[in-house]
Image (spheres, rainbow, N blue to C red):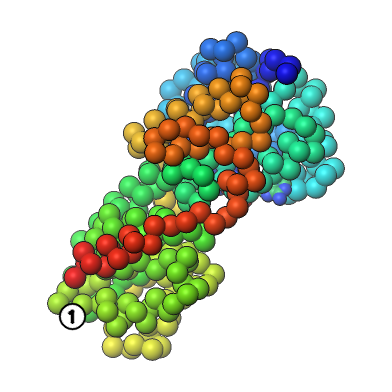
Amino acid sequence: MTKIKCIGILTSGGDSPGMNAAIRAVTRAAIYNEIDVKGIYKGYKGLITKEIVPFKTNNVSNIIQQGGTILKTARCMEFMSVEGRKMAYDNMMEAGIDALVVIGGDGSLTGARIFAQEFNIPIVGIPGTIDNDLYGTDTTIGYDTALNTIMEAVDKIRDTATSHERLFFIEVMGRNAGFLTLNGAIAVGAEDAIIPEISIEVDQLEQLIENGFRKTKNSSIVLVAESEVTGGAMGMAERVKKEYPQYDVRVTILGHIQRGGSPTASDRILASRMGAAAIDALLEDQRNVMVGIQNDQIVYVPFSKAIRNDKPINRALLGTLRMLSI
Ligand code: ADP
């Protein structure tokens, strides 16, 4: 085992609140352990275009409370090709970087896995995504903040939802995962949640209209996960207009407000623990793993597992939501 002298850190894919707290933790934990740090700007793109700068402890001062990522993030098509990754590897060697810490979602970790295997370099991933869709970790950095943002936004919409028999479909992000939608719905006391994990099995709209939309209420709020299967909130609204014209339907798409904002305490703590754990992993000669958290304990999950795209959602929560919305 050769001692790691210098690590590179990058954020990639969609940004999420708490990425900065993770950058800070990785940087400071590395320096504490006498490892040099280089910040790579704009994700994998910066490795190819050599946007690489030395990071000291003060480069990460005063960022723990900031949303977004000071390293910027990007989607990088060149990194999808062997030639692009070779260029990234050559630049990494030229900059004296022995190992990488990649903060991002499943796309970024898929890229990390391929890169690590191709060039035999140690890479540790940190799950930074609001979607919470990475397998092997109970939560991801940004998820709790996004849930809170959804809750605040929907609370405001409910304040205006006073007309009789008005049905609000509110679209929530999640990239084919229903975690934000289902738990957001419980947090706001919504009447129902329409999630992609179940859309392929049953017609949730039919169920909603039959059981869920109560005449005793002035208005109903239904959270809908973005989804190609259901067409999201717009798709639902179109169907209601056609099939149940007696209802007055409104649509709100929460959009990018869900990605921004100062991270919650939970996300800052999670990011700090995961950042420190990423350096522990490299010191222990672990490679090709994502840092995860299970039952409040740090775990290391092989990339191949983390990105498998079938993280189970707790379906019983849908029953709880419906029971409590009577
Ligand atoms: P996220 O990490 O938020 O899921 P993306 O799916 O957009 O975001 O992925 C971010 C970046 O990761 C891509 O722009 C690309 O550079 C890299 N990446 C994703 N998938 C692959 C892949 N199969 N091979 C190589 N690089 C990939």
Assign the N terminus to one quadrant of the image: top right
User: Relative to the observer, which residue lies in front, 287 or 157?
Assistant: 287
Q: In this view, does 309 lie to the left or right of 177?
A: right
Give whichever of 217, 3 is nearer the camera. 3
Say what secondary structure mark 1 lies in. loop
Is residue 178 visible from the viewing direction of this image? yes
For residue 87, above or below residue 223: above
Q: Eyeballing the image, is 196 above or below 65? A: below
Image location (x, y in percent) of residue 200: 50, 73
> What percent of the width, then of the height, locates residue 88?
77, 34
Q: For the residue marked with disc 1, what is the amino acid?
A: Lys
The response on whether ligand 1 sits within 8 Å of label 1 is: no
Quadrant position of residue 109:
top right
Q: How many marks?
A: 1
The quadrant in which the C terminus is found is bottom left
Which residue is disc 1 drawn over? Answer: 215
Image quarter of residue 138 = top left
| For residue 81, side relative to residue 239 (left or right) | right
Q: Which residue is drawn at 62% across and 14% down?
A: 35
Q: Residue at x 39, y 57 (%)?
A: 314
- Please state if 192 lies on the left or on the right of 288 as rendered: left
288 w.r.t. 222: above or below:
above
Residue at image position (76%, 38%) is: 117
Decide: few, some or many residues near mark 1? Use Cα within 10 Å; few <14, some 14-19, many ≥20: few
